[in-house]
Amino acid sequence: MSEAAEKPARGERTRTTLLDLAEISILEKGFAATSIEELIAAAGITKSGFFYHFPEKVDLGKALLRRDNASVEAGLTQIFAAADAAHDDPLDAVLAALKAYGEAASKSPTSRPGCLAAAFSYQDTLFDDETRDLIQYGMAFKHGMIRAALARVAPARPPRTPVDLDALADMAIAVVQGGMILDRVRPPEEAVLSAQMTLYRIYVQKLFAGFDKQDRLVGA
């Protein structure tokens, strides 16, 4: 590899390292409490090296959100596509996808589950409209994927009681976000997020179809 080619590669590694370090710090203590000084010390670079990649701290935040949105978009697209391919019944597919979504949300670079969009939203006043738009996009994408999956279930299995599918999709996100918070303050062995997602899936199944002949949750 030529020296000219090696420098951009090294620069990209440094940028990725800064993003990784910042993600962990923000998930643990928030954007405001994450300092440029701690990041450059952990990355082993100079302050000018940091500003080469991110002219201002808010630019680091935007880059993190763009990366997180891309990861969420790719991950959820794969999850729901795989569930649709594995199940002929749209209800079975959405239950399987919701289970995988909950499992993915439980994984985190920190010791407890966390969500960058939520972490940023707690300090909304620190950011400009572009940053807020990035936060909203990530949440809107999750909503859209779940809402579309539920919409495929409703015609084939009309709900037992009238239900707003938008609110039902929001409920899934609320369960995950709330589960993350509880998992951060409860003993690790309790796995609150996983338990809450199981209850949400039971609710969805009973709403659209009840239980199968073995009286168990399909896709469990």
Image (tube, grey):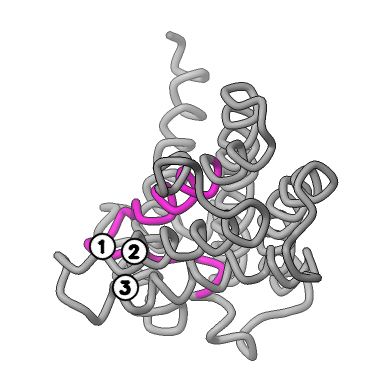
C-alpha separation, residue under disc 3 versus residue under disc 2 = 23 Å
Q: State which mark lies toward you, 3 or 2.
A: 2
Outermost residue toward the top? 1
- Tell me residue 49's x, y (percent): 44, 53
Q: Residue at x 55, y 76 (%)?
A: 120
Magenta stretch in the rendered image: 97-118
Residue 28, numbered label = 3
Q: Secondary structure at mark 3?
A: helix
Residue 195, numbered label = 2
- Quadrant containing the C terminus is top left
- Quadrant containing the N terminus is top left
Q: Is residue 87 above or below residue 210?
A: above
Label 2 neighbour load within 10 Å: few <14, some 14-19, many 20+: few
Q: Amino acid at mark 3?
A: Glu
Q: Is residue 23 above or below residue 182?
A: above
Outermost residue toward the right? 155
Indicate whether residue 195 is drawn in magenta.
no
Q: Which residue corresponds to mark 1?
A: 41
Asked if the residues shown at circle 3 and circle 1 are in contact, with their CB atoms under 8 angstroms apart, the answer is no
Q: Nearer the viewer, residue 77 or 14?
A: 77
Q: Nearer the viewer, residue 1 or 93?
A: 93
Q: Is residue 206 left or right of residue 25?
A: right
Q: Amino acid at mark 1?
A: Ala
Q: Amino acid at mark 2?
A: Ala
Q: Secondary structure at mark 1?
A: helix
